[in-house]
Image: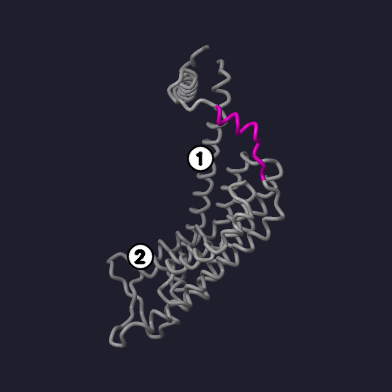
Amino acid sequence: MTIDNEASKKLPLVEHLIELRRSLLHSVTAIVIFFLILFPFADEIYTFIAAPIVQAIPGSNLIAIGVISPFLTPLKMSLILAIYIAMPYLLYQLWMFIAPALYRNEKRLVLPLVISSTILFYVGLLFSFYIVFPVIFNFLASVGPESVNFAPDIQYYLDFILKVSFAFGAAFEVPIVTILLIVFGATTAEKLKKNRPYIFIGSFVVGMVLTPPDVISQFLIAIPIWLLFEAGLFFSSFFKVRKNNPDKSAASKNQSKDWTDKSHNEMMDDIEIEMNSKVIGTPEKDN
């Protein structure tokens, strides 16, 4: 069986798709394993997650409006917690999928970035659970009329907890994002420093969107985002910035942009024949 040069150059794309499938299967398997371990303790897990609002509002009770909410809500909480626990492995699979596209010196960053990304994500979760949520729930309990009993639905409470906690976990990845943008040449530290005022304002906009309309909780997310951005700028100086090849960039700009030309159509036909032959076992077209 012969494979033409054009198709052989595209063969790694098929291999990358296979690698993506393998990474997804491994990630789903890890989540299922942790879920099966946590499921028997679903009620205890939800009781622990409900602690911030119960402590902030003594004597209050969570209610269940839906008929099957008392079963589905702890089940959903166990699944989300399984994803959080499996996060280090999920990040590792993500970085290993990206690794083939990196240079040798960049591949050395995979393990440190996985470790730092995981730590920052968990720090964001803990920060939201032990610092932000008590402030938010105390604020919500103080603004309502005294004649109204504050008894949130367990499903709404879970959705709120997941939204805010994940937002904090993702927001604490700001240093990693900043470093990667600089390392891969998407921007420079100098440009980011010039845009400091906009980033500072943007951090407060994010805090306004993710938290209730009180100044304290907005500061609790805006200030960490700003400080983490500054930390990313500082540590980016210790990494080597990727330099694009000007000759290769110029050559890519000079390539034809006409997707209807003969060479492009022949290349795509050859790749389609090759992929079909792997599926149904038909012989490929010989050149």
Residue position for label 2: 71
Q: Quadrant of residue 173 in the image?
A: bottom right
Q: Quadrant of residue 160 in the image?
A: bottom left
Expressed as whole percent of the image width and height from the top left, the position of residue 253 reads 55, 31
Using the rendered image of the protein, determine whether residue 41 is visible from the camera's viewpoint: no
**Front residue (pair 28, 90):** 90
Expressed as whole percent of the image width and height from the top left, the position of residue 66 reads 28, 67
Numbered mark located on residue 47 in the image:
none
Residue position for label 1: 21
Q: Is disc 1 placed on a helix, strand or loop? A: helix
Three-letter code for the amino acid on which mark 1 is drawn: Arg
Expressed as whole percent of the image width and height from the top left, the position of residue 191 reads 60, 54
Vertical placement of residue 75 versus 106, above or below: below
Expressed as whole percent of the image width and height from the top left, the position of residue 8 reads 57, 23
- What's drawn in magenta, residue-wise? 242-254
Residue, far bottom:
146
Report if the CB atoms under discs 2 and 1 are less than 8 Å apart.
Answer: no
Q: Distance between the residues labelled 2 and 1?
A: 32 Å
Q: How crowded is mark 1: few (under 14 residues within 10 Å), some or many (20 or more)?
A: few
Q: How crowded is mark 2: few (under 14 residues within 10 Å), some or many (20 or more)?
A: few
Confirm whether the magenta stretch covers residue 127: no
**Front residue (pair 159, 259):** 259
